[in-house]
Amino acid sequence: MSAPTAPSAVSGVTLAGTVAASASLADVSAAIALASPGDTVCVPAGTATWNGNLDFWNWKADLVLTRGISLVGAGIGLTNITFTSAYGIGYAPSSSAFTNNDRLRISGFTFSHAANSTWGYSSGQGGAICLYGYPYASTLQNRIDHCRFVSEAGAVINAQGNMQGVADNCEFVYTSNAWRAYLFLVSATSGDRSCWDSVGYAVPGHPFGQADQFYIEDSTIDGPMWCEAGQGGRYAVRHNLFTNDTEFDMFDAHGNQPDTGNYATVKVEIYDNVFTGLTKSHRLIAARGGKSLVYNNTLTGTSQVDSAFLNSYEENNDYLSPVNDASVSVQYPNDCYFFANTKNGVRFTDVTISGTFNYTGIGAPQRVVPQKDLDLFWEQAGTFTGASGVGVGLIAERPVSGLTVGVGYWATDESVLYRATGSAAWEVYYTPYTYPHPLREG
Amino acid sequence: MSMPGISWTHDGLNVTGFYAVTDTDPAVLLNPTKSGTTYTVPIIHVGSLSVPGQHALIIQAVNADGTTPAPAATVVKL
């Protein structure tokens, strides 16, 4: 019998990732300094006020990140951070982060913001987390999850430029009506049209159901909220629970602003959300620019219900618009589909068009915009014939003839939106993007 | 997107398991993931290693014969 053979020696023992000594900004910053892209920095339970006041483009932030890491707290209510600068966490990915398509994750915190009158909606800046991908270093893999945001006066999540990703399993809690609190805003810098004209990142025409936007899903929003996009912004809000009152415009798709040179929203998608406890007068959406897709939202409460629940209008001449650029969409409200939304169990079957602009003799499309069944399509009362609006039902019940080009049909058994391309022809126009968002995997 | 982890290399010969000894903690049998000759385990599975501070860590390769060299690595963490 031979003698036992010992295993060889273990070697190369290394620690990947860092653990901050505490939740203080100094300790977290020190841990981040030791981290490499892709690493996880764990922040232990604790309470801290961050006073970073670091330069972050034209603003200030308590913590500035330039590469993709995972910043993970001990959990909601366990790692509690109070911000004091205009932005709490600013992420401005470096060129290396862009080249390597870094992944950023912020998870497991409660964030609040110390009162500060110098920032907020009126000053156009400030917020909890700013993903600043403008103009050259956008990243596509950004995830913010399992965080609670309390009393944020600015933009809770401000995704600027082509910053894509998802916020999921977050809690947005507001205790003040002092501000219209952005849930988030997705935009480029004022006056710049890169998000419209530099669309190499996007599918031409900006179809719905793509990854090229910022998603918020499976989160709770309690209190006043206003979710806005503009200046090339794109967002999708789905599978969330909204409780108590929101702001008048729950969702805004901002139009163009010739006076400032700003461009319109590219597209928004709002679907499969539940809104409860509404008591004020609201508009579910102000579709002022770009594409809007609003469906399967359930609203309950005592708020005024009128035709303004779904509202669309054109307020400016698109003379600065890339309207003639075939690679992009048009800025005025277009390709808007509203259907299967209910308030206290009653379907919305009307949309208010509260403002129009006549492009006749000015430019494309040489007519008044927006118009029903040309730019805007919504569910009609009564039986859907295919002549107008959007139908909702089983695919087998979809009309086969007498269609108006552009009308939609939501096949409930397929979760597919079809669009008429001829008097007797349909095309698949939209299928929801992968749910849950792929960034939630792994 | 995983938690911080401890990695080490081993040729995998004559070994039936790995133990970790952190500071003065009792030895903990590890269940690492293996990729080639690299083994990885989240720090939350390594005794008190997830507690902020400085720790001494020993990874031991063992087999059923009970013979084991014991190289050590001191991991300094914030």
Image (cartoon, coloured by chain):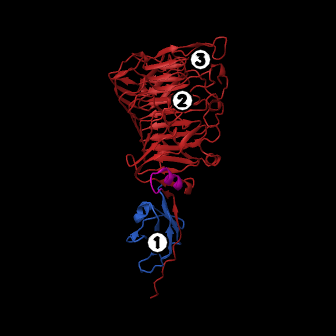
Chain colours: A red, B blue
Where on the picture, by quarter, is residue A360? top right
- Between residues A29 and A405, which one lies in front from this camera angle? A29
Residue A389, image x and y in percent? 47, 18
Q: Are marks 1 and 2 on the same chain?
A: no
Three-letter amino acid code at disc 2?
Ser
Q: Which chain's residue wears label 2?
A: A
Within 10 Å of disc 2 (Cα), the crowding (few <14, some 14-19, many 20+) is: few
- Work out whether residue B25 can be spotted: yes
In the rendered image, the vertical position of residue B38 relative to residue A393, given as above or below: below
* Left/right of residue A137 with respect to residue A9 in the rendered view: right
* Contact between labelled residues 1 and 3, with CB atoms less than 8 Å apart: no
Q: Which mark is on residue B58?
A: 1
Q: Is residue A129 magenta?
A: no
Question: Which region is colored magenta?
Answer: A20-31
Q: Which residue does the image show at 54% across and 23% down from the upper left?
A: A335
Look at mark 2 in the image and give the residue it sits on.
Answer: A123
Q: Amino acid at mark 1?
A: Ile
The answer to whether dots 3 and 1 both sit on one chain is no
Name the residue rendered at 67%, 11% in the picture: A361
**Does the CB distance between marks 1 and 2 fall below 8 Å?**
no
Circle 1 crowding by C-alpha within 10 Å: few under 14, some 14–19, many from 20: many
